[in-house]
Amino acid sequence: MKTFGKQAIDFFQQVELNINIQGIEVMNPYKKPEIFNLTATFFKKFYDDHHSRTFIFGINPGRFGAGQTGIAFTDPINLAEECKIQNNLPQRHELSSQFIYKVITEYGGVEQFYKKFYITSLSPLGFTKDGKNLNYYDLQILKEAVYPFIVESTRKQFYFGANPHKAICVGGDKNFKFLTQLNSSLKLFKKIIPLEHPRYIMQYKRREIDWFSKKYLNTLKNCELNT
C-alpha cells in the first residue's frame, strides 16, 4: 500500500491540464525537474506514512508560492528556512506563505502540522493572464473549462487519506461556495469550514494578524482527525 506521500508524488508527477483560452496560461511547475524534485523531497520528508489528514483547500497556486516551489502556500524562503529543504529558487517571500507559516509555527512547527494536515488547492495548477495571477473563478469561461479537472483532482487527492468528517476552505466566499457545491455532488466531506484567505489578511487586515492567526489555530484544533 502506497504511503500518503507516495500517492501525492505520483499525483503531482502526472497532473496536467490542457485548455485553450486566449490570453490565459496554465502554470505547471511539476514539469520542471528541479521543482518536481523539491516537491518529492517535501512529501517524502513529511508524509512518509499511512496516516489520514485533514485537508485544507486554497484557490489555485500563485506565481511566487506553489507556482514556484510546487508546494501549496510555500515560498522558496519558507521551504528552506522552515521545511529545511534547500533550493536554488529566487529567495523572495510571498504574502500568503508568510501568514501560513506564522500559523504553522504557532501550531507547533512543520513536523506537527504536516502530520495532521494536507494543504492543496481546488485547482492544483495555477493560471496567469497578462503576467498576473488569475483565479479559476475570475472568468466564467475558465471556471467552466477547469471544472472537470477540479472534480478529478479533488477526488484523487481525497483517496490519499482524507479526514472525511471535516475540511477547511481558505479563499473567501467564491472558493467556499464552489467547494460546497462540489462537495454536495461528490459527497466527500461531512462539513467544510471557511477561513479568510491569507493574502486578504496580509493586505487588508495586517493590524489584526494575531486575531486571525488565533482563529486559524482554533479551527485547526477543531478539525484535527482525533477530535
Image (spheres, rainbow, N blue to C red):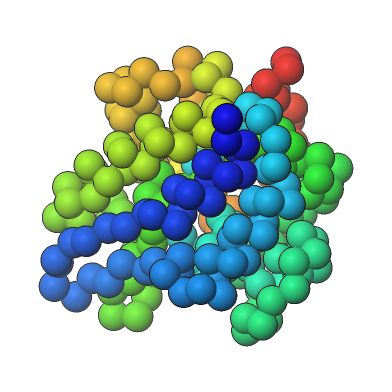
Q: Is residue 139 left or right of residue 56?
A: left
| Quadrant of the image containing the C terminus | top right
The quadrant in which the N terminus is found is: top right
Q: Write the residue at 37% across / 50% down.
A: 123
Q: Position of residue 46 (x, y in %)?
A: 72, 47
Nearer the observer, 209 or 42: 42
Q: Position of residue 64 (x, y in %)?
A: 54, 72
Of 48 and 165, which appears nearest the observer?
Answer: 48
Q: Position of residue 214 (x, y in %)?
A: 76, 39
Along the viewing direction, whichever of 18 and 101 lies nearer the viewer: 18
Q: Residue at x 61, y 44 (%)?
A: 5
Q: What x and y, as percent, mark residue 88?
A: 66, 82
What residue is drawn where x is 56% and y is 55%?
A: 72
Q: Is residue 40 visible?
A: yes
Q: Is residue 114 above or below residue 51?
A: below
Location of residue 60 with respect to 174 vertically, above or below: below
- Asked if residue 94 is positioned above or below residue 58 in the image, the reply reads below
